[in-house]
Image (cartoon, helix red, strand yellow):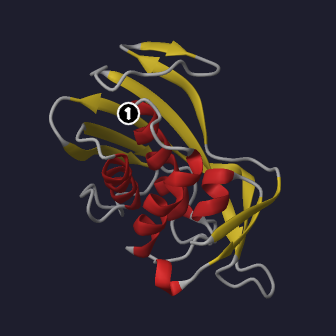
Amino acid sequence: MSSTDIISELPRCKQRGIVQKGLDIPGKPRGIKPHDYGSQVRVFAPASVSNLGPGFDILGMALATPGDTVVARRTRGHGVTITSITGDGGRLSRDPLSNTAGIAAMETLKKAGIEAGIEIDLIKGMPLGSGLGSSAASAAAAALATNLLLGAPLRKSELLMPCIEAEAAVSGRHADNVAPSLLGGLIRSEEHTSEL
């Protein structure tokens, strides 16, 4: 991904308060230290529409609703576990290697260079196969949640490649849905195969 332009400001992936040791703390999150086992975050990522006109696999736009929510927790040990998925009718795998949320979380850990344990609860807020970037929203929410639990070592734009890796597992290596779900707005992305 050589460039991603935010053309307009629309809804984007965002945290909806931080839950620490059972307490819901609404508003802007305080930093979580990487050693805070038991800390949780709740992140919402909006649906997106892509393949707009001539912008096949290049243009995408975030929507206000619906979207997916990830509740993620720091755990002792290493690796990613998906503990539950709701709203999918039992169709999605809880294997983190086969689920975009799990792949995005693992790729975020790898990009940050941090070994940590992450548990994910995925709440699907849109139908699978709806054309609204359902898998991209799951990936964006999981990547941001994982980054927040690590103390936010990566900028939001640095989470794009972990999300693209997750999308590549299910629908191809392009940012037309994950970029708007993560960054918001109307996004134009340019891909160069030498960089992917």
Residue drawn at x 79%, y 88% as measured from the top left: 54
Classify 182 as above or below 16: below
Number of residues whose C-alpha sits closer than 10 Å to that of mark 1, classed few (under 14), some (14–19) or many (20 or more): many
* Picture mark count: 1
Q: Is residue 172 visible?
A: no
Quadrant of the rendered structure where residue 51 is?
bottom right
Q: Quadrant of the N terminus?
A: bottom right
Compared across the picture, whether 163 is left or right of 112 comes to right
Q: Indicate the position of residue 25 as horizontal and vertical percent values.
A: 54, 14
Classify mark 1: helix, strand or loop.
loop
Q: Is residue 185 left or right of 196 when viewed as pictured?
A: right
**Residue at 34% over, 58% down:** 90
Image coordinates of residue 196 in percent, x first then y, are 46, 78
Residue on which the image places disc 1: 150
Picture residue at 24% right of the left edge, 37% below the top? 116
Residue 42 position, x and y percent, is 49, 32
Quarter assignment of residue 23: top left
For the view shown, which residue lies furthest in the left direction?
Answer: 77
Q: Which amino acid, by three-letter code, is at mark 1?
A: Leu
User: Is residue 167 among what the camera can see?
Assistant: yes
Can you tell which quarter of the image residue 104 is in? bottom left
Give above or below for 88 relative to 31.
below
* Residue appearing at x 50%, y 85% in the figure: 193
x and y percentages locating residue 17 in the rendered image:
57, 24
**Does residue 73 sit above or below 186 in this rendering?**
above
